[in-house]
Amino acid sequence: MNPGLQTAPGYVGSGALTEQRHRVLRNTYWLLALSMVPTVLGAWIGVSTGLAAAMSPGVSMVVFLVGAFGLMFAIEKTKNSAAGVPVLLGFTFFMGLMLSRIVGTVLGLANGASLIMMAFAGTGAIFLGMATLSTVIKRDLSAMGKWLFIGAIMLLVAGIANFFIQSSALMITLMVMAIGIFSAFILYDLKRVQDGEETNYITATLGVYLSLYNVFQSLLALLGIFGGDRE
């Protein structure tokens, strides 16, 4: 290494870069854990009040899409300010409210509570597996992002189409695909932080949170379909 580089203005040593990446990763994990609190609170309020269940499926879909994309836009605008974390937590509360529809349906099953715990445990296992993989894999995964994004868009479009088609087989297929695609997204997003490609922990948290949300929702729906005991 050229000694002159170490004293050049703007030079950041490898140790400082490594520390920065570790700090972003730590903050991402802490904020991710914190985001579960408003999510659970939102789901509990939604189930208790029947708010999400009271909406028709069509109204629920519109509210979800407008609310989710609107809040994600707000997070992007505030991610570098003091308002970033509260806006993100507000978003996770909203997502919890929207999740209450399927949670309430599953809780109506005889073994509903155990299915929710199984879905939670399964999501946790996937997260731990992807987080571990992200520290083991050394190759650059940036090319993966384009294909995962295309897959997520296709899932969204197919999901909206299936709202009108009402195909059970297509719904189950989309849920299985969602678990695979969003599990890969967890690996991709965490790897970007570790490689220094993502330096904003609010953006990193949002990406991983959305993936965990979709994995949990899909797992819960599949468990409800195939493992639910009717009263």
Image: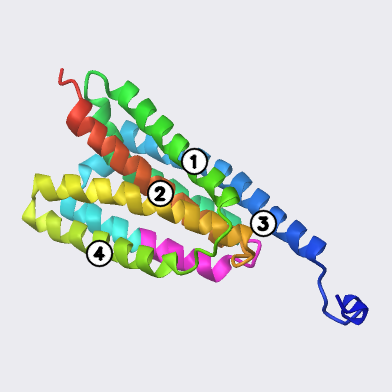
Q: Which residue is mark 1?
A: 129
Are the residues tagged 2 and 1 within 8 Å (C-beta)? yes
Q: Identity of the amino acid at label 4? A: Met
Give the Cα separation between the discs numbered 3 and 4. Answer: 30 Å
Query: In this picture, which residue range is highlighted in magenta?
Result: 68-82
Q: Considering depth in this image, is 221 or 129 the residue closer to the camera?
A: 129
Q: Quadrant of residue 192?
A: bottom right
- Give me the C-alpha separation between circle 4 and circle 1: 25 Å
Figure colour scheme: rainbow
Residue 19 position, x and y percent, is 76, 57
The answer to whether residue 140 is above or below residue 101 is below
Q: Is residue 101 visible?
A: yes
- Marks 4,2: beta carbons within 8 A: no
First in sequence: mark 3 vs mark 2 = 3
Q: Is residue 51 visible?
A: no
Whichever of callouts 2 and 1 sits on the residue coming sooner in the sequence is 1
- According to the picture, the residue beneath numbered tag 3 turns out to be 24
For badge 2, the amino acid type reads Ser
| Residue 50 horizontal/vertical position (percent) | 27, 36
Amino acid beneath label 3: Val
Report, in whole angstroms, how far the alpha carbon at label 2 lies from the one at label 1.
Answer: 9 Å
Magenta-highlighted stretch: main secondary structure? Answer: helix
Sequence order check: which comes first, mark 1 or mark 3? 3
Residue 123 placement (x, y as % from top left): 41, 38
**Residue at position x 43%, y 66% from top?**
145
Q: CA distance from mark 3 to mark 2?
A: 21 Å
> According to the image, label 2 marks what residue?
183
Task: Specify the label residue 154 is tagged with.
Answer: 4
Disc 1 versus disc 3: distance between alpha carbons? 20 Å
